[in-house]
Amino acid sequence: MSDSEKPVSAKGVVEEVYRLRSSFGVKVSRIIGRAKYVQKSGFNSFLKYNYATEGDFLALLKPLLDEEKLAIVASQDSVTRDELEPTTRGRRQWLTTVKMTFKVIDGETGYSEILTSFGTGIDSEDKGLYKAITGCVKYFISKLFLIETGDDPERENENETGDNKPPATVRPLAEKKPEPPQTEVLTLITKAQELLEKVSGKTGNRATEILKLASGYASKKDDTFFFITPETLKTTTSEKWLKMTIANLEKELGVSK
């Protein structure tokens, strides 16, 4: 029986995996030792700061990866897109978040490691996904090989230009505030309040209970009950609720149309 035909024991398999992983780790470690810092050739003219471009990272790492016979294969797993508050100029903008998988392969042994990373990008047009992917690649490379960029997120109140200014923040899209009642609605509110006072005086019941009976109705779609209270009556903007409430209050008073 030749050596290639001999059965491999479980212990032998484990030892081989450890050997391949050790060789892989040594190669990554050598790159970490040589790729100490990346130069920043990019400049954001709007926010006035320097940054390391994807090209800066690749220019530093490609020769080192080639020497160590390591390859990186990237794939996109998922993408989400959330709308943010408009820009100061009123333009709509979106936050794109991408999840990516990176397979780092040792070309000499075939051993590989699969790692995951995330990236985000904000844009008012169609470049959010590309910004997110670029950011994800740069983040993955910088963390895998521990490359110093000078961008420490824990350094508070200091941006890349050295100015003591807090970084710009982006707030999520705020919920729309309810519009103030229109003239017709205000007229209906006033009428409902007058009728409510009359019904309360006639029956001696509390205004809250009267309104609960007068305004509650079952939705045909989901059988959910909605009620108007004396407090919400003042700010209600639904003509449908108000007209129904008024009709029920008039019915209680015996008023015929």
Image (cartoon, rainbow, N blue to C red):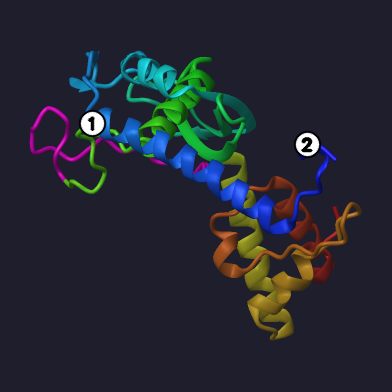
Residue 47 appears at what percent x and percent y?
22, 22
Horizontal arrangement in the rendering, residue 43 relative to residue 164 (left or right): right
Q: CA distance from mark 1 to mark 2?
A: 43 Å
| Disc 2: CA contacts within 10 A as few (<14), some (14-19) or many (>=20) | few
* In the rendered image, the vertical position of residue 18 relative to residue 209, given as above or below: above
User: Which label was assigned to residue 4?
Assistant: 2
Q: Earlier in the sequence, mark 1 or mark 2?
A: 2
Identity of the residue drawn at 40% across and 27% down: 138
Magenta range: 157-179
Which of 35/149 is in front? 35
Horizontal relation, residue 144 to residue 79: left or right: left
Q: Amino acid at mark 1?
A: Lys
Image position, residue 92 (x, y; %): 47, 23
Which residue ends up furthest to the bottom in the rendered image? 204
Nearer to me, 123 or 204: 123
Q: Magenta span has 22?
A: no
Q: Which mark is residue 228?
A: none
The numbered dot on residue 36 is 1
Decide: few, some or many residues near mark 1? Use Cα within 10 Å; few <14, some 14-19, many ≥20. Answer: some
Among the 4 quarters of the image, the one containing residue 29: top left
> Vertical placement of 216 versus 58: above or below?
below
> Measured from the top left, where is residue 13 in percent x and y?
68, 50
The answer to whether residue 150 is left or right of residue 197 is left
The part of the image, by quadrant, that contains residue 230 is: bottom right
Instruction: Label the magenta part by its dominant secondary structure.
Output: loop
